């Protein structure tokens, strides 16, 4: 069975343009950490990383188990489809997050151009506080009209998240913040960004900042606790 570190290695290879073979396999792997579980789909190759879906002693590679019955042969979109994700969420006791476009960019030298940033506290902004809930070693920068968050997410990768306030939109701030992430990512990058497919403005901004789409991803998140009464 692949070790948890294998997902980090797979992502590192993908960031360098070395992708898994388009063999149609759906591989079931253990989680890289207790927090992170989900599905990452590359071209014709998908990895499900969820401990509850992988029994002890399962073979490496293409283990499918009973959840594999929800994956019709030849249907490459099935691992990110509602039936499979709902079953996986039930198995893990989690809820399904959004299915995002997974993008990555290399680090760039020097300070970020074209945007004035100041370090901020994650607790000072709801967007930053929410992003911090899914990442470690979180760092936050604020700019007039926007926020940039960097932190370690799935398998320890550096992830960025950008929010532009309504009054700051249409002026290239989203692209500037996405580009700034490439200058600010520690240890030489790379930096990853998950973007909802319907957020066309954010997707365009990240593409313009040099991020490249490499796949799609759906994370399994802890179930929300009931509000205190």
Image (cartoon, rainbow, N blue to C red):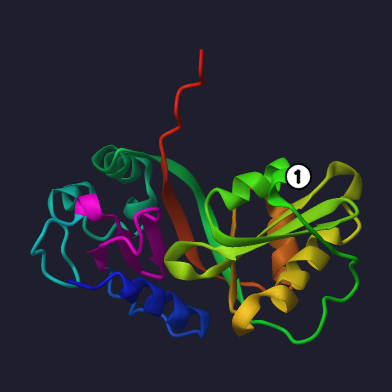
Q: Which residue is disc 1 drawn over?
A: 124
Q: Is residue 98 left or right of residue 172?
A: left
Q: Is residue 199 left or right of residue 58?
A: right
The foreground one among 72 and 226 is 226
- Taking the spot 82% from the left edge, 76% from the top edge, the residue there is 112
- Taking the spot 8% from the left edge, 64% from the top edge, the residue there is 57
Q: Quadrant of residue 192?
A: bottom right
Q: Residues within 10 Å of mark 1 (few under 14, many from 20)?
A: few
Q: Which residues are magenta?
A: 25-53
Residue 112: tell me if it is visible. yes
Residue at the extreme left of the image, as rendered: 57
Residue 86: % across, % down: 33, 39
Q: Is residue 14 left or right of residue 90?
A: right
Residue 41: % across, % down: 40, 63
Quadrant assignment for the N terminus: bottom left
The foreground one among 165 and 103 is 165
Q: Is residue 28 left or right of residue 56?
A: right
Residue 22: % across, % down: 34, 76
Q: Quadrant of residue 84?
A: top left
């Amino acid at each position: 069975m692949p070790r948890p570190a294998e997902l980090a290695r797979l992502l590192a290879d993908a960031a360098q343009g070395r992708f898994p073979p388009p063999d149609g396999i759906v591989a079931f792997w253990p989680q890289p950490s207790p927090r992170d579980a989900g599905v990452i789909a590359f071209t014709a190759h998908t990895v499900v990383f969820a401990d509850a879906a992988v029994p002890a002693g399962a073979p490496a590679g293409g283990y499918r188990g009973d959840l594999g019955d929800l994956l019709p042969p030849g249907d490459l979109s099935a691992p990110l489809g509602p039936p499979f994700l709902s079953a996986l969420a039930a198995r893990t006791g989690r809820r399904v997050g959004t299915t995002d476009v997974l993008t990555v960019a290399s680090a760039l030298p020097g300070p970020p151009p074209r945007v004035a940033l100041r370090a901020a506290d994650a607790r000072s902004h709801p967007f930053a506080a929410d992003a911090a809930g899914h990442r470690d070693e979180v760092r936050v920068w604020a700019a007039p009209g926007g926020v940039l968050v960097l932190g370690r997410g799935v398998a320890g990768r550096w992830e960025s998240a950008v929010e532009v306030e309504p009054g700051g939109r249409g002026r290239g701030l989203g692209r500037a913040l996405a580009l700034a992430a490439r200058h600010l990512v520690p240890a030489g990058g790379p930096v990853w960004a998950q973007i909802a497919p319907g957020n066309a403005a954010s997707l365009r901004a990240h593409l313009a900042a040099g991020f490249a789409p490499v796949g799609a991803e759906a994370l399994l998140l802890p179930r929300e606790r009931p509000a205190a009464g």
